[in-house]
Amino acid sequence: MADLPDVLDAMGKTPREFGTMHVHFEGYHVVDGNRCVASVLAQAAFVPSAGASLRLFDGEAELASALILPLDDGRVLRFRIPFRKQPATESLTLKVDAPEPSASAVRVRPVWKLLDTFEIPRLSEMNPVHADDDLLTLGGRAAVLALAGGLTGSLFLQAAGVGSAALEATPQTKVHRAQELPPLAGPRLEGVTRPIDGVEAEVVWTVGQAIPEAPPPVPQVKPAAPAQAGALRWCRTCGFEGPAAEYERARSCPRCDEPWF
């Protein structure tokens, strides 16, 4: 199968890669009371894809689970998962369990958010690095350059599945595996949604359709600058004057009630 478009990224939904799948946790809507519906987007990163299981948590308590079947046809699905929760919690976490790609699997979408992190201590704490420069990957060269520059506590990242750094872990060097990344977090979303009896799968995109557009960016409203000390606010109608810091939020003149703009 030819490379597939990264639909989640085009929608402004940054995915994280788990096994053969890309997953994005949008969050959850409240139905009423303690009834809620979580929203999870998924697309295949490899073909054949092996699917994945989703587990929704409120702290340590598991609320619901769902299964993503293989998406070898390239479709992008939105899974709606019903659950019940206590109203006090605002953010939930989603744990994704997925098998690694098989030896015959072919990548059809780019790597996303699947990184191994190498934590490098001070140069004095490191064992000498003995490696032919031709054998070092780009990540390995970056690590050696960082060491040569005397940087302390340096970090460098390397995408899994694109080769591994020749710099191996030593008792002083820690390797934080991508598979150990924390679960996905999803907030409570604005508005309410309809109740559902079981897990639903909605087709967001399929091969041959136009790629959904990302939502427009939310404009950032710049807060008003605080009034300077000694500044005055005055009314053009009656001539009233007062400290700007005291009347900066007033919409009308306190003397004549003329609207202030």
Image: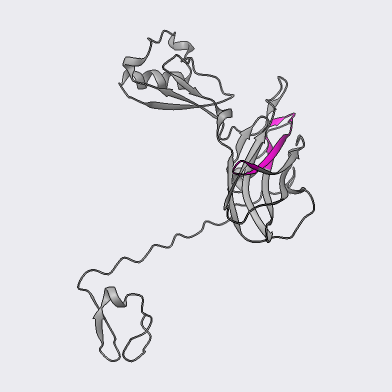
**182 or 252: which is nearer to us?**
182
Of all residues, the one furthest to the left in this rendering is: 230
Would you place residue 122 above or below residue 58 in this image? Answer: above
In which quadrant of the rendered view does residue 25 lie?
A: top right
**Residue 6 in view:** no
**Closer to the camera in the image, 110 or 50:** 50
Instruction: Please say if 221 is above or below 77.
Output: below
Give how far across and how far down residue 196 sits, in percent.
Answer: 77, 55
The residue that appears at 26% across and 87% down in the rendered structure is 240
Q: Quarter of the image containing the N terminus?
A: top right
Q: Is the magenta stretch mostly helix, strand or loop?
A: strand
Q: Which residue is drawn at 72% across and 36% down?
A: 53
Q: Is residue 78 left or right of residue 234?
A: right
Q: For the magenta stretch, what is the residue range?
A: 42-61
> With 87 as the anchor, is 256 left or right in this view?
left
Q: What percent of the width, then of the height, locates residue 205?
A: 72, 47
User: Quadrant location of the C terminus?
Assistant: bottom left
Q: Find residue 65 and report its horizontal and vertical position in percent.
A: 72, 42
In the foreground, 51 or 82: 82
User: Of residues 6 and 62, which is closer to you in this image?
Assistant: 62
State how many labels appear.
0
Q: Is residue 70 left or right of residue 140?
A: right
96 displayed left or right of 128: right
Determine the residue located farthest toward the right in the rendered image: 197
Q: Which residue is rendered at x = 64% and y = 52% of the image?
A: 28
Magenta stretch: residue 50 in it? yes
Q: How is the image coloured?
A: one colour
* Residue 169 seen in the current view: yes
Q: Is residue 29 magenta?
A: no
| Residue 209 x %, y % | 73, 48
